[in-house]
Amino acid sequence: MWWMGKADVGSGLSATPGAQNAGIVVRDEPHAGQMISVRPTSPMVMNSASVHRDQIVSSYINIYFPDDIKGSIGLDPWYSLISAVSEMPNKPIMLEKALAATSCIYIGRTKRDNHLLSQGLQLYNGAIRHVSHQLSRKNYTDDLFYTLGIFQVLATLYCPAGLHSLIHQTAVTNGIFQQCFRHVSNTPLIKTLCLAFQRMRLLKALSPMEAKSGVELVIEHSPDELVSDEDQAVDELFHLMAGIAPISAALGMTDVSDDDACHLLLQDSLAHRDKMLSWYSREIRRIGGAPSVGQSGEFPSSTIPSAEHMFGLPYRFPTLDNARIHIVYWAALSILQELIGQAYAYTYPYAPVDSNNKNKEHQLAEYYADEISRGIPYCLQDSMKAWGASGTIFGMGQIAKVYMELGNSEKFMWSQELFKHEAELGSDLAYHMHHLLLFSWDASQKARQGALSPESWSSTSHQSVPATPPSPVSSLSSASTAPFKEEYASMPGTINVPVRPKLESDELEC
């Protein structure tokens, strides 16, 4: 079965405040030699299993989502989906169990209540049986579509088998989504949810954990099907982002000895960047406006260390949706800049580079990564709860990748604090990405040590080699990046000025 498997549930149990508020059974953490006692539930919970499930879902919503949610469906369909489903008067048992399973598993994980986690897994298995029955009968209903959407989100919260299992499950679910979409009702909610899940698929495909050679948005839609001006603008952005994949694929297939092919690839890459920059200048109002500069300590987080000494003051956004759009946009530009840097190196192999073998275009990739780092604190402030953090993982993956490739330990380790924070908020996806990136960091550091020249070894033959060599990238310090940041500070995609300054690479001719 392609669905996530069973989890090992330990014997250590702890009280769950959110669960207590919902009136469900919890157990206290026992002392050595003490019998485990069961706290009785309120009579109200015992009246109906449906009441029990509705209460735990309500508890989950209060824990996971911020108190004041503003903005449209944006880049995260989860709130719209769970709100619509939880308010349905007569939910089928499949949908009810799926929603309750997600709530129990999430609260059980974050509150370390293994009893509640076990209950959630039982509900999940029950929902899976209903899904399997409907799939075997090819009964593609609206309820099946909603249930698959819930499982899609649940997979990121609880994937004990690791990233490969999550990627496989997501791919299979997307295939079933396509079949469902051909049969379900033609409602605005279903259309918008399906488009939103496709956007999530594209983000995963462009992320470091799942690189694809080709990605496209396969669901046909017309502009009048999109729910708002903001959604139409975001739709255009994602179609531009889908155009990054062919550039990446072309880099892998281009013969570096073919000067004409390298020049053409570089020009295509620069042209695509111009399209993305033009999109921002054109659509800035429709996505809610540009961010402003916040104040020091304005967005408090109980676990994320301040990084103002590395990136400057954080950004303040009109809404969480607006923040997520900017983070996705900056991440896409950072990815594209890395590809342009490779194309530039193919075309001009003897052009000046810094001490880390990075050209000007690679440095611009770091600049956009720093912009993401200034935007993330707004999303991760305590008042945004887990939902605020969930929309930043694409940007988090990109900044970690950039800082790793540049060899900057301070910035990279700060990015890992973001993953640890989101993992503590209940995301297994963040947990697995954190460990994957740490493994990659260790491997990159060993590679850097192995790349030391014989001369450097002979000059230090009587000295011990440090476990982590000093970072060769002086451009990562605030002092050395000052001229670079001044040059690009007025670019679209940052703040205020809608015209990008001319770059040397713009003068290249095929």
Image (cartoon, rainbow, N blue to C red):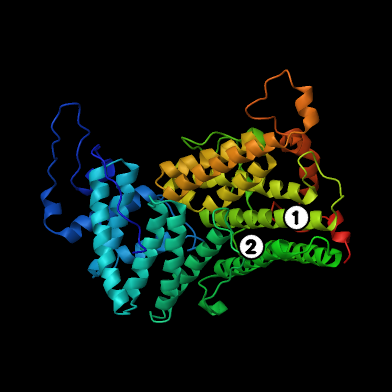
Say which of marks 2 and 1 sits in front: 1
Query: Mark on residue 285?
Result: 2
Q: Considering the numbered disc 1 on the image, is that residue within a helix, a strand or a loop?
A: helix
Viewer-closest of 494 and 427: 427
Q: Residue lying farthest top?
A: 462
Provide residue 50's location: percent of width, then percent of height. Answer: 19, 61
Mark 1 = which residue? 342
Q: Considering the numbered disc 2 on the image, is that residue within a helix, a strand or a loop?
A: loop
The answer to whether residue 464 is above or below residue 81 is above
Provide residue 22's location: percent of width, then percent of height. Answer: 23, 49
Disc 1 residue crowd, few under 14, some 14–19, many 20+, Cα 10 Å? many
Corner quadrant of residue 17: top left
Please indicate whether residue 403 sits to the left or right of residue 56 in the image.
right
Viewer-closest of 200 and 495: 200
Image quadrant occupied by the N terminus:
bottom left
Residue 402: in sight, yes or no?
yes
Please indicate whether residue 413 sits to the left or right of residue 347 in the image.
left
Image quadrant occupied by the C terminus:
bottom right
Label 2 to label 1: alpha-carbon separation: 33 Å
Please indicate whether residue 394 sits to the left or right of residue 100 in the image.
right
Query: Mark on residue 301?
Result: none
The answer to whether residue 505 is above or below residue 24 is below
Amino acid at pointer 2:
Arg
Disc 2 residue crowd, few under 14, some 14–19, many 20+, Cα 10 Å? few
Viewer-closest of 437 and 29: 437
Provide residue 28's location: percent of width, then percent of height. Answer: 20, 35
Viewer-closest of 445 and 30: 445
The answer to whether residue 289 is above or below residue 411 is below
Residue 299: in sight, yes or no?
no
